Image (cartoon, rainbow, N blue to C red):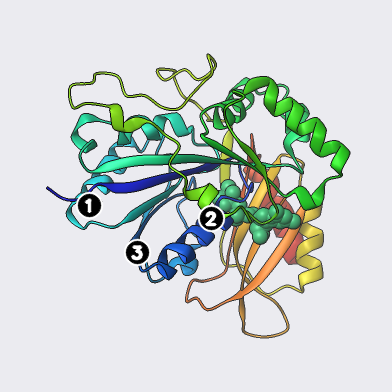
C-alpha cells in the first residue's frame, strides 16, 4: 500500500492571502526535501500564478470550483496523486470555495488509506472583513460562504493586519469569535508569516474515519456549516480581458481604482510602457501589487467580483484603450 499523504487545505475569500501562504508551505517543504503536490483551483479559465510553482507537481483545476461543480475533477486529480505519490499535498481552493465540501471529497472511503487531512487553514483579510459584512449585506450566499470558510477552519489566519489599526483588529477578532468555536486558534499575520509549526500542526481528526464510514467528518463546529447544502456562489463572476496593450503603471492603477466597487479582486500578467519585462499583478483590498516575472504567458487581466457587470467593465476598458 502507498504511504498516507499529508493534506493541507488552504481556504479563504478572494485576495485574503492563500497563495502567499501556499508559497511559504512549498518553500518549507522543499527545504526539508519533501516531494510537494499542489492542486490549484481557479474560478476563471486561466491561472496567472502558475509561474510561482514551476518545479512542483501541480495540477490546475480551472473554470469552476472544486467544492461543487468540479468535485469529479478533484477526484480524478486525487487519483493521480495516489499513483504518483507525494509527501505533502497542498490544496488551494478558489476564494469562493467552501472547505467542508473539499473535505468531503477527500474523506471518501476510497481515499482514506491514501490521504490524511492535517489542517484546514482559512485566511481572513483583516482589511476587508468588516467591510464585506456591509458590501455583501444583500448577498446571503456570500455572507454564508464567508462564515463557513471561518467555521470550517481548523486554523484561522487573520492576515493583512498591517492594513488595519489595533482597535479595528480587536473588533474583527470579537466578530470572528462570535461565530467560531473557542477551540479554533486565530493567528494574526502579515503576508502569512505564521510560524511553520503552527501551519503544519496536525489539527484535523479525520484519521478516525473507517472505510465503512458513511458520513465523512470535517472539523466544523458550527450549525451554519451545512454539508448537504445546495452550494451556490453564482453571483461571483470572473471577467477576462485579453490582447492587453502596454500601459504606464499609473494609468493602469488609476483605471483599476475607478472600477465599480463590486470588483473585489484583480490579477494577471501585464507589461508596462517602460520595457519588455512582464509583471504579475495583484489587485486586492483596493491595492495594486506588481512583481517582475519570467513567463511566456501573454498579457491578461482577470477581474473577479460580485454580480460583475462584464459589459460595463469591458466598456470601461475600451475607454481606457481609446484614451491612451
Ligand atoms: N498589505 C498586505 N498585502 C498582502 C498580505 N498578504 C498578502 N498580500 C498581498 O495581497 C495580494 C493577494 O494575495 P494572494 O496570496 O494572492 O491572495 P489569494 O487569497 O491567493 O487570492 P485569490 O486566489 O485570488 O483569492 C498579493 O498581492 C499579496 O502580496 C498582507 O498581509 N498585507
- Which quadrant does ligand 1 occupy? bottom right
| Residues at discs 2 and 3 in contact (Cβ within 8 Å) | no
Residue 196 is labelled as 2
Give SS at disc 3: loop
Q: Name the side, left or right, on which 81 lies relative to 245.
A: left
Residue 323 visible in rendering: no
Quadrant of the drawing holding the C terminus: bottom right
Residue 11: percent from the left, percent from the top? 52, 41
Viewer-side label of 1, 3: 3
Q: Position of residue 61 (x, y in %)?
A: 38, 50
Residue drawn 79% across the image and 53% down it: 162
Residue assigned mark 1: 80
**Can you tell which quarter of the image residue 216 is in?**
top left
Which residue, given by chain and number where applicable, does mark 3 sit on? Answer: 34
317 vs 193, nearest the viewer: 193
Label 1's element? helix
Amino acid at each position: 500500500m502507498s504511504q498516507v499523504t499529508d493534506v493541507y487545505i488552504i481556504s479563504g475569500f478572494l485576495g485574503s492571502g492563500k497563495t502567499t501562504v501556499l508559497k511559504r508551505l512549498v518553500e518549507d517543504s522543499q527545504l526539508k526535501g519533501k516531494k510537494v503536490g499542489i492542486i490549484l483551483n481557479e474560478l476563471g479559465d486561466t491561472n496567472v500564478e502558475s509561474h510561482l510553482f514551476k518545479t512542483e507537481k501541480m495540477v490546475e483545476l480551472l473554470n469552476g470550483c472544486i467544492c461543487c461543480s468540479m468535485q469529479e475533477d478533484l477526484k480524478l486529480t486525487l487519483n493521480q496523486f495516489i499513483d504518483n505519490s507525494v509527501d505533502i499535498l497542498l490544496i488551494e481552493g478558489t476564494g469562493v470555495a467552501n472547505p467542508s465540501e473539499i473535505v468531503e471529497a477527500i474523506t471518501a472511503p476510497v481515499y482514506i488509506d491514501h490521504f490524511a487531512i492535517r489542517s484546514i487553514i482559512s485566511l481572513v483579510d483583516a482589511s476587508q472583513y468588516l467591510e464585506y459584512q456591509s458590501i455583501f449585506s444583500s448577498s446571503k450566499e456570500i455572507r454564508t460562504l464567508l462564515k463557513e470558510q471561518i467555521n470550517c477552519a481548523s486554523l484561522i489566519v487573520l492576515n493583512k493586519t498591517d492594513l488595519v489599526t489595533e482597535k479595528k483588529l480587536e473588533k474583527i477578532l470579537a466578530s470572528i469569535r462570535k461565530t467560531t468555536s473557542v477551540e479554533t486558534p486565530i493567528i494574526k499575520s502579515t503576508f502569512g508569516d505564521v510560524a511553520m509549526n503552527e501551519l503544519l500542526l496536525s489539527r484535523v481528526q479525520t484519521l478516525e474515519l473507517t472505510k465503512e464510514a458513511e458520513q465523512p467528518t470535517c472539523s466544523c463546529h458550527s450549525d451554519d456549516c451545512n454539508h448537504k447544502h445546495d452550494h451556490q456562489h453564482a453571483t461571483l463572476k470572473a471577467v477576462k480581458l485579453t490582447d492587453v496593450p502596454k500601459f504606464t503603471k499609473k494609468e493602469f492603477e488609476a483605471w483599476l481604482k475607478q472600477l465599480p466597487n463590486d470588483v473585489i479582486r484583480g490579477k494577471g500578467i501585464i507589461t508596462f510602457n517602460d520595457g519588455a519585462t512582464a509583471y504579475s499583478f495583484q489587485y486586492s483590498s483596493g491595492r495594486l501589487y506588481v512583481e517582475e516575472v519570467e513567463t511566456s504567458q501573454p498579457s491578461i487581466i482577470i477581474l473577479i467580483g460580485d454580480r460583475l457587470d462584464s459589459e460595463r467593465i469591458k466598456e470601461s476598458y475600451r475607454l481606457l484603450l481609446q484614451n491612451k
